[in-house]
Every structure is written in structure tokens, then in C-alpha cells.
């Protein structure tokens, strides 16, 4: 009798201890989850606070001022913002069709035994660090573009009135166009991987019925697969765009890092991230540093929205696939 | 031309374009790897591992940079992994039906693709400015912040793959919740979680942007975590952009080392994921 009571109390003590440990464990995981959430907020707050002096000095005109002159302490963000947007646009124009082609190849065309190896090779393209893209771009791609593609573009488009301004100046090899090219290669594997995964969510019965009534492979992709996966494909593209906008090292190598504004694609330019990489640790004076951080804040806002849209679109597809 | 011929021709053209796109993607991979081998292999020599970075025109290697990269990657992984695993655990095990979990998942996915240079700026304002100097600690923290989202993502995915029956069986034996997670779920998902850590290491090993103004660089060998420390990516960046031929040679050597280390990690992670019974892989 006495024994049983004793045992009982130890059991309750033990289970109470376990319950406490349980609570503690759950609480810890929750704490870290909150920490991750706060991390993003902290990044945003830090950029905002450190960029505020520059905003106070220049106001919204910072966005469209084209002068970037550290000596005279006049800072305008437009050359970097323009460079960021244009290089990403070029990257998307080249990278998206290629990525869709790869995804189509992997899901519809490729013999099954090659699917995995080729898929992995394409994904390895995404694993190569951006600095390697940079060094390759500077020593191999830029000279190649300078001697072949750029003179060709100048010849073809250089005399067409409305777009002629995009191809002014000598073909230097380095510049906005080359940066866009490199970015296209870099985002290709990201977009291709998402698109392939999204293509695979199409119910086989839909695809098979389409083939069954005699559609060609191209028609199946255009009329069945793409409409079904539209949301996810756009999500994947936005994900790639988010990467392109924030990509730093590869761009820094090949864009020429000139803060002087030029609309020509062949001219050297800069992007927000390249500017940060180049000038940040050498920036003298609080206003200079603050202006660079303000640029960083702008980049943060742009990528945040692009990535948020990408995420929401992909979530919508998940829900659609689940039902 | 009949409609059938036209459709067949269109199909053929589109299929060729698709094939061409894939070929182009693979071509770029091989061009980059080929360039690395072509330029990097002649630069490799034992002295790369034994001597510190030289002044232009002098003999030297990359020993200090390799050391710095290894140490900072290690410290970053040691800091980032537990944070990532605990957060991933919350999302997979306790997050169901809470308002917090979807929010954290959303933020985590944004962190996953956020420009890494902004993380560098963030750590600069947070650590470098208050401390008054660049340091390897700051570099490690910046890299750790990049480790977290990768580990969170894979941990959550891998924990979700553990069959509910396994958990229920453990609960039915009266196992407390935390023990179920640590002793049963973690164990079942271990290989998958390690894959995530390897992928995270592969990601930060080549990261340059967040180190530019946190760890900065140091041309001398040092083990002082409280000061600037040399590291491979930043050395590659500086040396490749320099006009000196011998510096550029070293840059290619470093680039070759780092790329093959990363590709090796990536392929290793895939094997690990497959080996864990195929359930973890697609």
C-alpha cells in the first residue's frame, strides 16, 4: 500500500517534469521561429534607420537624380536603379524563354533515363557561386561579346531611329548588356527548376487526354500545361527576377561600375548591389555611407515585393494542387 | 500546306528550340567548368596551401584565405544550424493552425532569396559600426544569417516526410512530446536534415557579397576572429580585378578550389538524400 502511493507520487513528479520539458522545448522552437520573423524586420529597420540621413538630405528626388558625386556630396540613385532594372529585364528576356525550353525538354521530351542526370546538371548551374560567374564573365564572356555579338547588334539596330540610343558607343565588352547576359545564365536554372516542378503537377490524365485527341507536344504544352500551371510559372519567373535584382558579384565584375548615367546598353553602368560592393567599404563621410544604404533599402523594397508576389503565386498553385 | 503539315512543322520547330535551350544551358555549365580547369589547374601548386597571399610580383599562395573561409564557414554553420533546425521544428511539429507559422514560412522564403549583400550591410550596421572595426565574427554572423533559411526549409520539409504513424506509436507508449521529436522524428529525418546543412554550407562557401564589409580581407595569416580575416571569395574578387598576372593566376586557382568543393558538396548532398531510402528525394 505504502509502496504504491510512493510510486504514484514519483510517477506524477516525473510526468510533471516531462510536461515542463515539453513546454520548454515547444517554447524554445517558438522563440526561434519568432526570431527568424524578426530578422527580416530587423534588416529592414537597420537599412531604414541608416539610410534616413540621406533621405532627409535628398528626399524623394534621390530616386530620379542622376548625379552621383562623392566629392561634391551630391548623391542620386537613378543610375544604379536604372542599371538594376535594365540588367534584370535583359536577364528575363533571355533567361525566361530558355528556362521554359529546358523545363519543357525535361518534362515532355527527354528520355526518362536522362531526366535525372540532365536535371541535376542544370541545377548544378545554380550551385556555382556568383563570383565564379563574374570571373568567367570578365575573362571569357565579355571579350567574346565584344568581338561578336556587340558589333552585330550595333550593325543591325544602330541605325533604327527609336532604339538606336540603346546601342550607342563603342563595344567595350563590359557593360549593361554583358551583365544582363550573365544574369540570364544565372537565373536560368532557378526558373527552369521551379517550372519543371510546376509542369509535373499537371494531372497525367489531362496530358494524356490531350495527346489522345491528337495534339502535338508543342500544342500540349501551349494549350494544356501552360494554362494549367500559369500561376506557378509566373511565380517561378518572379523568383528568378528576385535573384537577378539582388545579384551582386557577377554583375560587379562585368558591368564596368560607372555611376554616370547612360541609356546605352553597351556602355558601362552600375546596379545597386554592384555599387554597394564597390564603394561601401571605401565610402568616406556619413552622407556617402547613408546614401549607399538608402540605395540598399530601395533594393530591399523592390526584391521584397517581387519575392512576396512570387511566393503568393506559388502558394496559390499549391492550394490548387491540394484540392 | 495542309494544316497537318503546318502543325507538325510548328511542333518540330518548338521541340528543336526546347532542345537547343537545354543544350545551351549545359553548354554554359561546361564552358564555365572548362574555363576553371583551363585557367585554374596551372595555378595549382602545393604552395597555394602553404603560403599566404603575396604582394604583387612575389611568390605566394592562398593559405590564409583558405583558413579564413573554412573557419568562418564552420562558425557560421555552427551558429546557423541550431537556429534553423529549431525554427524548422516549430513549423513542422507545432505550427499547425497557428498564425505564426505561415508568417514565419513566408518570411523565411523571402530570406532565402533576399540579396545577400543586404545581409552584409545589415551586419555592418549591427556589428562593425558599434565595434569600430571589421571582424571575422561579423563575417561569420552574416554567413550564419544565410544558413538559417536553407536549414529551416529543408528541416521542415524533411520532418513532414516522417510518417505520422511513427509519432503516434511513440505517443501511444507515453513518450513526452519533446522526446518524440528529438528521439524519433529527428532520427527518422536525420539524413534529410544533414542534406540541408550540406546545401547551406555549399551556399555560403562561395558567398562574397556579405563578407565584403564584414570580414573584409587580410593579406596576412591570422587566427584572430576579432579582426579582419582573409577569405577565398574576397581574395578571388580582389585578385581577379587586379592588373597583375600572378594575382589573376592565384584568383583562378582559388576559383577552381572553391567551385569544385561546392559542386562536390552539392552532389554529396544529393547522394545522401537518395540514400536515405529515396523517400526524401523527388
Image (cartoon, grey):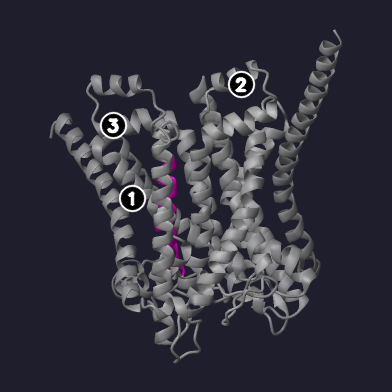
Of tags 3 and 2, the one toward the viewer is: 2
Q: Position of residue A186 (x, y in %)?
A: 43, 57
Image quarter in which the N terminus of chain A is found: top right
Per the rendered image, the range of residues in magenta is A176-194
Q: Is residue B7 above or below residue A270?
A: above
Q: Nearer the viewer, residue A273 or A88?
A: A273
Residue A121 is tagged as: 1
Q: Nearer the viewer, mark 1 or mark 3?
A: 1
Q: For label 3, count other residues whose C-alpha is less than 10 Å away and answer few (under 14), some (14-19) or many (20+).
A: some
Residue B279, horizontal then vertical, whole percent: 43, 31
- Provide the secondary structure element on which disc 1 rests: helix
- x, y percent for residue B92: 62, 31
- Residue farthest to the bottom? B57
Sort mark 1 into few (<14), some (14-19) or many (20+) by Cα contacts within 10 Å: some
The residue at the point 62 percent across, 38 percent down is: B88
Q: Residue at x 45, y 71 (%)?
A: A254
Q: Is residue B271 left or right of residue A317?
A: left
Chain containing mark 2: B
Q: Are marks 1 and 2 on the same chain?
A: no
Q: Closer to the camera, B15 or A246?
A: A246
Depicted A117 relative to depicted A147: above or below: above
- Above or below: residue A304 compared with residue A318: below
Rounded to the nearest whole Å, what is the CA distance between mark 1 and mark 2?
Answer: 41 Å
Q: Secondary structure at mark 3?
A: helix
Q: Are marks 1 and 3 in contact (CB under 8 Å)?
A: no
Mark 2 neighbour density, 10 Å: few (under 14) some (14–19) many (20 or more): some
Q: Relative to A102, say whether B169 is above or below.
A: above
Residue bearing the label numbered 2:
B170
Residue designated by label 3: A219
Amino acid at each position: 500500500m505504502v509502496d504504491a502511493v510512493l510510486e504514484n507520487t514519483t510517477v506524477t513528479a516525473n510526468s510533471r517534469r516531462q510536461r515542463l520539458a515539453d513546454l520548454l522545448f515547444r517554447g524554445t522552437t517558438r522563440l526561434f521561429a519568432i526570431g527568424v520573423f524578426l530578422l527580416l524586420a530587423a534588416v529592414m529597420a537597420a537599412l531604414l534607420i541608416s539610410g534616413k540621413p540621406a533621405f532627409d538630405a535628398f528626399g524623394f528626388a534621390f530616386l530620379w537624380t542622376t548625379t552621383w558625386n562623392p566629392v561634391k556630396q551630391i548623391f542620386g540613385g537613378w543610375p544604379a536603379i536604372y542599371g538594376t532594372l535594365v540588367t534584370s529585364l535583359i536577364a528575363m528576356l533571355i533567361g525566361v524563354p530558355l528556362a521554359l525550353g529546358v523545363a519543357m525538354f525535361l518534362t515532355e521530351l527527354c528520355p526518362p533515363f536522362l531526366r535525372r542526370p540532365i536535371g541535376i546538371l542544370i541545377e548544378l548551374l545554380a550551385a556555382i557561386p556568383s563570383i565564379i560567374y563574374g570571373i568567367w564573365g570578365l575573362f571569357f564572356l565579355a571579350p567574346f561579346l565584344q568581338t561578336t555579338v556587340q558589333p552585330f547588334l550595333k550593325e543591325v539596330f544602330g541605325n533604327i531611329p527609336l532604339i538606336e540610343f540603346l546601342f550607342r558607343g563603342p563595344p567595350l565588352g563590359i557593360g549593361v548588356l554583358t551583365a544582363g547576359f550573365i544574369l540570364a545564365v544565372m537565373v536560368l536554372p532557378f526558373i527552369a527548376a521551379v517550372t519543371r516542378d510546376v509542369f509535373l503537377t499537371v494531372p497525367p490524365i489531362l496530358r494524356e487526354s490531350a495527346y489522345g485527341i491528337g495534339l502535338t507536344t508543342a500544342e500540349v504544352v501551349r494549350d494544356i500545361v501552360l494554362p494549367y500551371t500559369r500561376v506557378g510559372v509566373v511565380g517561378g519567373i518572379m523568383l528568378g527576377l528576385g535573384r537577378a535584382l539582388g545579384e551582386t558579384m557577377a554583375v560587379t565584375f562585368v558591368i564596368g561600375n560607372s555611376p554616370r548615367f547612360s541609356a546605352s546598353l553597351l556602355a558601362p553602368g552600375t546596379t545597386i548591389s554592384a555599387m554597394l560592393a564597390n564603394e561601401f567599404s571605401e565610402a568616406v563621410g556619413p552622407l556617402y555611407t547613408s546614401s549607399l544604404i538608402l540605395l540598399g533599402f530601395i533594393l530591399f523594397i523592390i526584391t521584397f515585393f517581387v519575392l512576396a508576389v512570387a511566393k503568393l503565386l506559388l502558394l496559390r498553385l499549391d492550394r490548387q494542387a491540394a484540392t | 500546306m495542309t494544316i497537318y503539315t503546318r502543325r507538325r512543322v510548328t511542333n518540330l520547330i518548338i521541340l528543336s528550340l526546347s532542345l537547343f535551350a537545354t543544350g545551351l544551358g549545359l553548354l554554359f555549365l561546361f564552358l564555365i567548368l572548362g574555363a576553371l580547369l583551363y585557367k585554374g589547374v596551372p595555378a595549382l601548386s602545393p604552395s597555394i596551401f602553404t603560403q599566404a597571399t603575396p604582394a604583387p610580383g612575389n611568390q605566394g599562395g592562398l593559405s590564409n584565405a583558405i583558413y579564413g573561409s573554412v573557419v568562418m564557414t564552420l562558425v557560421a554553420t555552427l551558429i546557423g544550424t541550431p537556429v534553423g533546425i529549431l525554427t524548422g521544428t516549430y513549423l513542422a511539429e507545432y505550427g499547425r493552425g497557428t498564425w505564426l507559422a505561415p508568417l514565419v514560412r513566408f518570411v523565411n522564403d523571402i530570406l532565402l532569396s533576399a540579396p545577400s549583400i543586404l545581409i552584409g550591410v545589415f551586419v555592418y550596421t549591427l556589428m562593425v559600426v558599434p565595434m569600430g572595426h571589421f571582424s571575422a565574427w561579423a563575417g561569420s554572423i552574416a554567413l550564419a544569417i544565410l544558413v538559417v533559411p536553407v536549414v529551416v526549409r529543408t528541416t521542415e520539409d524533411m520532418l513532414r516526410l516522417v510518417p505520422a504513424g511513427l509519432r503516434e506509436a511513440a505517443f501511444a507508449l507515453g513518450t513526452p512530446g519533446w522526446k518524440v521529436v528529438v528521439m524519433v522524428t529527428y532520427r527518422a529525418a536525420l539524413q534529410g536534415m544533414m542534406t540541408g546543412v550540406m546545401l547551406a554550407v555549399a551556399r555560403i562557401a562561395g558567398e562574397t557579397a556579405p563578407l565584403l564589409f564584414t570580414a573584409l580581407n587580410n593579406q596576412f595569416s591570422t587566427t584572430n576572429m576579432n579582426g579582419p580575416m582573409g577569405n577565398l571569395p574576397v581574395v578571388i574578387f580582389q585578385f581577379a580585378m587586379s592588373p597583375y598576372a600572378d594575382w589573376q593566376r592565384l584568383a583562378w586557382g582559388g576559383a577552381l578550389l572553391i567551385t569544385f568543393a561546392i559542386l562536390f558538396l552539392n552532389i554529396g548532398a544529393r547522394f545522401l538524400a537518395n540514400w536515405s531510402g529515396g523517400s526524401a528525394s523527388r
